[in-house]
Amino acid sequence: MTAKIKLRSQLHLLTGFMAGFVLAFVLLLFVYDVNRVTPCWSSASTMSTATARIQDIPPARILCMVLTCPENVENLARAVHNTWGQRCSHLIFASSEDYEPLGVVQVVEPGGGGYEDLWNKTREGFRHVWEHFGRDYDWFLKADDDTYVVMENLQHLLSGFDTDTPVYFGYKMSRYNVSYMSGGASYVLSREALNRFMTQVYESEVICPQPKKMGIEDFYMGICMQNVGVHFVDSSQSLDGDTKPKFMPLDLENYMSEANTTIPQWLRQMSSSRVETGLTCCSNYSVAFHYASRERMFLYEFLIYHLKIFSPNQILELNERSQLTLSELIRRYPLEDNSNIKDLLQMSEKPDNF
């Protein structure tokens, strides 16, 4: 009897050990993915904890403020509205005139919305956003109307940061020993960063440049952010194992030349990260591309969200299906009758009437 009880206890112990081993192995497979690129705040020792935390956090609420002008509303602004702007939590255009159909609001005087007023438009645009939406959103993206943004990648990059901490996110550059984020490539402010901008520097002539014509918008914003203790996050350092830039100050086409002749010298000199060209120029998780025409925006939209690529498994499945018989080929793709060559040649020699 004692031997049976002892044997039963050993079986229970062995069963429990095997069950625990299997469960641990399954969890390890679920959590650990060697191909996954993770935010820089997630080290190998905290991978499982960080992964669980991300899955529990709802998507960040991102307000997109896009600077535009009246002459660009029906072209670039509408292209933004019809493409990537649809994926913002809230989209607002800042201009010198209201245009209700697209949500364009006047933030500077009429006729004052050109390049020379970029700093004033940015200041007043953020003032409008803070007064009307400051408590409703987590992050505040500033972009130009010729920038295309991949919102899903931006969501992932921001997931590792707390919006109640002062964070300034983008493509890091430097001028006169002052760091700042490229305005053309777009940049992001956390709610706390925008709070500090509006409550500590907006009215100050000491720590932040005041409204002026031809102000260097992104450089000025860098000065303001530094003077109120906001942390600069260069997006090229925001993902472990991925040191490529993710906010691109130029059109993507500029980076595709292997000759290195399409990148202006000023960008190489001012960029904090190395500027490369070719297919390895940019992160596979890139967020923003500058100098995008209306047509280029729709090209990005199609390639990213509509173009489908067959997987190897799908190709194998297609190869295993039965091929068309000759009768099916004739029925679906009948031959055209072009036997009257003389008439066809005479028609082809006539001027087209299209």
Image: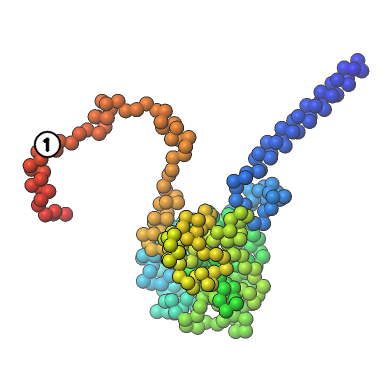
Task: Note whether 329 is above or below 231 in the view shown.
Answer: above
| Label 1 neighbour load within 10 Å: few <14, some 14-19, many 20+ | few
Q: Amino acid at mark 1?
A: Ser
Q: Is residue 217 left or right of residue 4?
A: left
Q: Which percent across, then down, holds residue 345? A: 10, 45
* Count of number-bearing discs: 1
In the rendered image, which quarter contains the C terminus?
Answer: bottom left
Residue 85 appears in the rendering: no
**Residue in view at x 43 percent, y 35 percent:** 315
Q: Which percent across, then down, holds residue 151? A: 51, 56
Residue 154 appears in the rendering: yes
Residue closest to the far front? 259
Name the one closer to the observer, 312 or 280. Answer: 280
Name the one closer to the observer, 91 or 275. Answer: 275
Give the secondary structure at mark 1: loop
**Residue in view at x 36 percent, y 65 percent:** 75
Q: Which residue is mark 1?
A: 339
**Residue in view at x 47 percent, y 55 percent:** 279
Q: Which percent across, then down, holds residue 298? A: 39, 56
In the rendered image, which quarter contains the N terminus?
Answer: top right
Looking at the picture, the colour scheme in use is rainbow
Task: Note whether 328 is above or below 56 in the view shown.
Answer: above
Task: Note whether 1 is above or below 53 in the view shown.
Answer: above
Q: Is residue 316 left or right of residue 123?
A: left
**Residue in view at x 54 percent, y 61 percent:** 245
Task: Note whether 68 is above or below 28 in the view shown.
Answer: below
Q: Give the image quarter of residue 5.
A: top right
Q: Give the image quarter of residue 235.
A: bottom right
Name the one closer to the observer, 130 or 334. Answer: 334
Residue closest to the far top? 1
Q: Which percent across, then down, holds residue 102? A: 42, 64
Q: Is residue 233 left or right of residue 15?
A: left
